[in-house]
Amino acid sequence: MKLQEIADKLELSGLTPVFDKDVTGVYISDMVSDIIANAKAGNLLVTVQVHANALAAANLVDVTAIVLAQGKQPAEDVLRMAAKHEIAIFTTALNRWQVATKLYEIGLR
Amino acid sequence: MTEELRRPRYELVDVKPGFVIIEKEMYTQAARAYFSSEPSPPKEPYREGSQVWGFWETAQALRFAVKDTATGEVTRFDELLGLMFYGACDPSSDLYQIGDLAQDNKISIYVAITYEAPDGSRVNIPMDKIRLLNRLYNERIRSANKKILILPDLFGLYRELTYGQIMLDFGLTAMDGPAPAGQQGEGA
């Protein structure tokens, strides 16, 4: 499923440009070490973690984009770094469970 | 291409969750770290020669090995404290500037930071292991033209970085951005 399609269906607020990429699955985690060990390339990462190291971990394993739940907002330098690495960051007022259920409802597994 | 052909050759195996325990020397404020699978490190200061070391900070982390599924060979990475992203460095640093240039060509640079040796230097990580890490992460990438380049610490970064710059999970301070300077490791 295309990233833009997901962003539209969940009414996510884009904090960076949205890159033309496919999303092949979802991983939910707030731990850098867990992301490194278990997230997969092409995943959409759902988290409340806004630390720059979460972006570093997401980039290492080539996640497609990051959805920040509960209205979390990263620092400007993190957004700049994400854009440079072509990892889109979105924010939403939904919590992680609500994001997960909505992603399931639109067909992501 | 079939799923079988797409299956990665290298796999993370024997992944053990644990803790990076950071200690500080009472007089010199030198810091050092070690991996523990126990969540409760010794909190009492202890003497080591003329030095007095005490618990300072802990971070959740993993210890792992990499398996080459083609040969069955398993390589442990016990000396690896963590990876540091170039973007975690000061923008005026050599590594940041090299990383910034490399990223223009879709190459993301990380540095493998190892644990301290007993003499205060760093444990060496063989170049073959660095190559293995690079293969592990690069073979999974789906984004077009993207590359990961993990380097050994050729820059001597361990002398000046803070533990907060390494990709570790530092308690609740990690939830809201970088920890204040006074809560990070020094001279990691």
Image: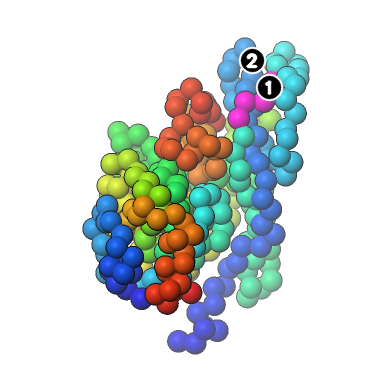
Amino acid under label 1?
Answer: Gly
Query: Is residue B158 found left or right of A94 in the rendered image?
Result: right
Instruction: Relative to A64, say whether B54 is above or below.
Output: above
Instruction: Relative to A15, say whether A26 is above or below.
Output: below
Q: Mark 2 points at which residue?
A: B26
Picture residue at 72% right of the left edge, 25% below the top: B43
x and y percentages locating residue B114 in the rendered image: 58, 41
Residue interval drawn in magenta: B53-57
x and y percentages locating residue B93 in the rendered image: 34, 34
Secondary structure beneath label 1: strand
Q: Quadrant of the N terminus of chain A?
A: bottom left
Residue nearer the viewer, B24 or B48:
B24
Colour scheme of the picture = rainbow
Picture residue at 49% right of the left edge, 87% below the top: B2
Q: Do labels 1 and 2 share a chain?
A: yes
Query: Is residue A19 found left or right of B128 in the rendered image?
Result: left
Picture residue at 48% right of the left edge, 74% below the top: A109
- The answer to whether marks 1 and 2 mark residues whose Cβ atoms lie closer than 8 Å is yes
Magenta highlight on residue B55: yes
Query: Is residue A16 found left or right of B152 in the rendered image?
Result: left
Q: Secondary structure of the magenta portion, mostly?
A: strand
x and y percentages locating residue B146 in the rendered image: 35, 63
Q: Which mark is residue B30?
A: none
Q: Name the residue under label 1.
A: B54
Q: Please, which residue is most extreme toward the bottom here?
A: B2
Q: Mark 2 lies on which chain?
A: B
Residue A2 visible in image: yes
The crowd level at tag 2 (other Cα within 10 Å; few <14, some 14-19, many 20+) is some
Dot 1 or dot 2, earlier in sequence: 2
The crowd level at tag 1 (other Cα within 10 Å; few <14, some 14-19, many 20+) is some
Magenta highlight on residue A60: no
